[in-house]
């Protein structure tokens, strides 16, 4: 699967936040969030439930207005240039937004038509190929596995070739195999030049995918850096001696031998016999 490069004349970071604040009545969700996302990179926003990850994504995608602070996406201010932001982005929420009655191909064609793009059928076929869904393209989405639905959901987000894509909890509820399939799709996006901001609770997901990782806690970014930089915040690893106890597999091969009878096997059987 190869994603063609995303071209954008805008210079500077793809996403830029400074002093972002948001409250719901008395509840302060964001208390001054700052970070930048480089173009063509994968940026992971880590945090527990209620940390404010989805609120950040909603503000960046113009679905919600911040109380204070500034945010720019692909060079456009989210408050004063919302139309430019919307033309530059695509958002994939926590649940796959696909029509289960339609086939995978029909879902893609529908989105392409809604975006008023030429030759929606060719666009759909290309995306099915990129995400290894060609064989399943004619089947109803109701028959898809969780990983296939999520890949189709991401493919639908790429209709129109957006410069920035937001993935909010992209693998929530997926089994390990489906999660790996989605990870492969996300890596291909960045390799093609698309900027990816993903929110996740899975530490392994951020470790596997992200060029940079930020941890959002109690409404603030408490750390922001590469995985190597974050690991340097902890003391060096200690080497400790751990005595390895024999497993049942070790006992089995000691008794029967891997290629027939062995001295170890004979000795083990003799010891057992004497004990009886």
Image (cartoon, rainbow, N blue to C red):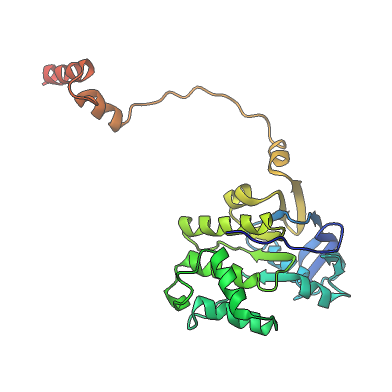
Which residue is pictured at 68% across the width and 58% down the height? Answer: 192
Q: Position of residue 179 (x, y in %)?
A: 52, 58
Q: Can you say whether 150 is above or below 42 in the image?
A: below
x and y percent of residue 215 in the render? 71, 52
Instruction: Look at the image and tell me whether residue 96 can be seen.
Output: no
In this picture, residue 32 sits left or right of residue 145:
right
- Measured as percent of width and height from the top left, residue 266 is found at 17, 17
Q: As rendered, which of 226 and 217 lies closer to the eye? A: 226
Q: Residue at x 24, y 29 (%)?
A: 252
Quadrant of the snapshot with the N terminus:
bottom right
21 in relation to 248, above or below: below
- Which residue corresponds to the image point at 54% horizontal and 81% vertical from the top-left? 106
Residue 253 falls in image quadrant: top left
Give residue 23's position: percent from left, percent from top: 78, 70
Residue at the image position 76 percent from the left and 48 percent from the top: 224
* 130 left or right, relative to 41: left
Q: Quadrant of residue 150?
A: bottom right
Q: Quarter holding the C terminus?
A: top left
Left or right: where does residue 265 sit relative to residue 86? left
């Amino acid at each position: 699967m190869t994603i063609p490069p995303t071209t954008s004349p805008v210079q500077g970071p793809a996403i830029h936040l400074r002093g972002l604040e948001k409250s719901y009545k008395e509840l302060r969700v964001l208390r001054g969030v700052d970070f930048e996302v480089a173009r063509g990179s994968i940026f992971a926003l880590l945090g527990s439930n209620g940390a404010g990850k989805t609120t950040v994504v909603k503000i960046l995608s113009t679905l919600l207005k911040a109380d204070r602070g500034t945010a720019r996406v692909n060079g456009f201010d989210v408050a004063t240039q919302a139309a430019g932001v919307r033309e530059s982005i695509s958002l994939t929420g926590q649940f796959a937004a696909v029509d289960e009655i339609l086939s995978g191909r029909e879902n893609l064609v529908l989105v392409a038509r809604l975006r008023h793009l030429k030759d929606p059928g060719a666009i759909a076929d290309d995306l099915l190929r990129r995400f290894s869904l060609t064989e399943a393209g004619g089947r109803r989405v109701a028959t898809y596995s969780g990983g296939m639905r999520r890949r189709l959901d991401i493919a639908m987000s790429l209709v129109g070739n957006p410069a920035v894509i937001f993935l909010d909890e992209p693998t929530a509820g997926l089994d390990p195999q489906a999660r790996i399939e989605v990870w492969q799709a996300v890596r291909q996006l960045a390799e093609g030049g698309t900027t990816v901001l993903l929110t996740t609770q899975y530490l392994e997901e951020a470790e596997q995918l992200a060029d940079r990782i930020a941890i959002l806690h109690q409404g603030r970014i408490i750390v922001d850096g590469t995985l190597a930089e974050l690991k340097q915040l902890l003391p060096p690893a200690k080497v400790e001696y751990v005595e390895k106890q024999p497993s049942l597999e070790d006992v089995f091969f000691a008794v029967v031998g891997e290629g027939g009878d062995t001295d170890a096997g004979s000795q083990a059987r003799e010891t057992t016999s004497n004990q009886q």
